[in-house]
Structures are given as C-alpha cells and as structure tokens.
Amino acid sequence: MNGILPQKAADYLEENYRWDWGESIGYYYEFIESYDEASDSWLVNQISVSLDDGTYVYFDLEGNFIEDFRPWEPGATEFSLEFNPLGSSWGEGGTFTFEGQTDGSSPAFIDIREGLFIS
C-alpha cells in the first residue's frame, strides 16, 4: 500500500525526534502488512518510520504513536535467526550433534527459524 504519512504522525516526529543541535531528524516510512486469518488476506495495520539516527517509530494508521525502538540501547530486543538442534539431523534419520561433521557424503538437514534475541 502506498500512502501519505498522517499529519498527526509527522507532527509527533517533528516534536519528539531531533538531533542534539535542534534540527529535525530525517526519516522514511512504510506501511506494514500482517496476515489476517479470519479474512484470509493481508491487511495494512501499522506504519513503520525509520529515523536517520537508527530509531524505529511505529504508528497506527491514524497517526497515533504506538512505540519506538532504539536497537543500541541496553535491553533492546531484535529479531535474529536461531539454530534448532532438535529439528536438525545428519543424513536420513540420523542424530545431530554439535561435534558431528559431514564430508559431503552424508547430508546435514538444518532447521533454522526466526527467533527473538534479547541482549
């Protein structure tokens, strides 16, 4: 979905996110979709704003502030990939171990999923 950032959100950014010397921080934004099982369709439900200082700010479609995220701050969470040793194996029906190796004759089946990393 292409759209214009609601004025309410633009005003909030102008008022609350400035460089130390007082200038407004630049940004770009995108509309975020999520899958709605009830309607079996993708729905736009949020606006994500990426500031030039690395901060992410989220708004609803009316421009109401939801939250901001500064990935460099202690305790920040970020998404990452994680290795699942229980869902992985060596070869057909084999057992995966961290010490195991493959030389190309026995394939390794790796289960990698999106996880939540908390620093």
Image (cartoon, rainbow, N blue to C red):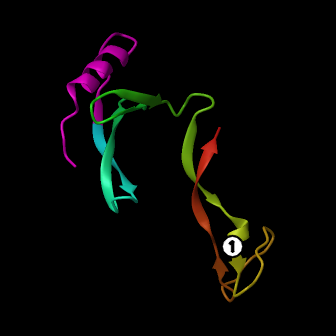
Which residue is depicted at the point 78% across and 74% down?
100
Q: Is residue 40 left or right of residue 8?
A: right
Q: Which residue is mark 1?
A: 88
Q: Position of residue 73 (x, y in %)?
A: 57, 28
The amino acid type found where label 1 is placed reads Ser
Quarter holding the C terminus is: top right
Q: Which residues are magenta?
A: 1-28
Which residue is depicted at the point 29% across and 37% down?
29
Label 1, residues with CA under 10 Å away: few <14, some 14-19, many ≥20: some
Using the image as rendered, state which of residue 73 and residue 40 is in the foreground: 40
Q: Position of residue 1 (x, y in %)?
A: 22, 49
Asked whether residue 6 appears in the rendered view, the answer is yes
Q: Is residue 81 left or right of residue 4?
A: right
* Outermost residue, front side: 38
Asked whether residue 53 appears in the rendered view, the answer is no
Using the image as rendered, state which of residue 111 and residue 103 is in the foreground: 111
SS assignment at label 1: loop
Which residue is depicted at the point 62% across and 28% down?
74
Q: Is residue 52 left or right of residue 117?
A: left
Q: Position of residue 92 (x, y in %)?
A: 69, 88
* Rendered position, 103 above or below 81: below
Magenta stretch: residue 75 in it?
Answer: no
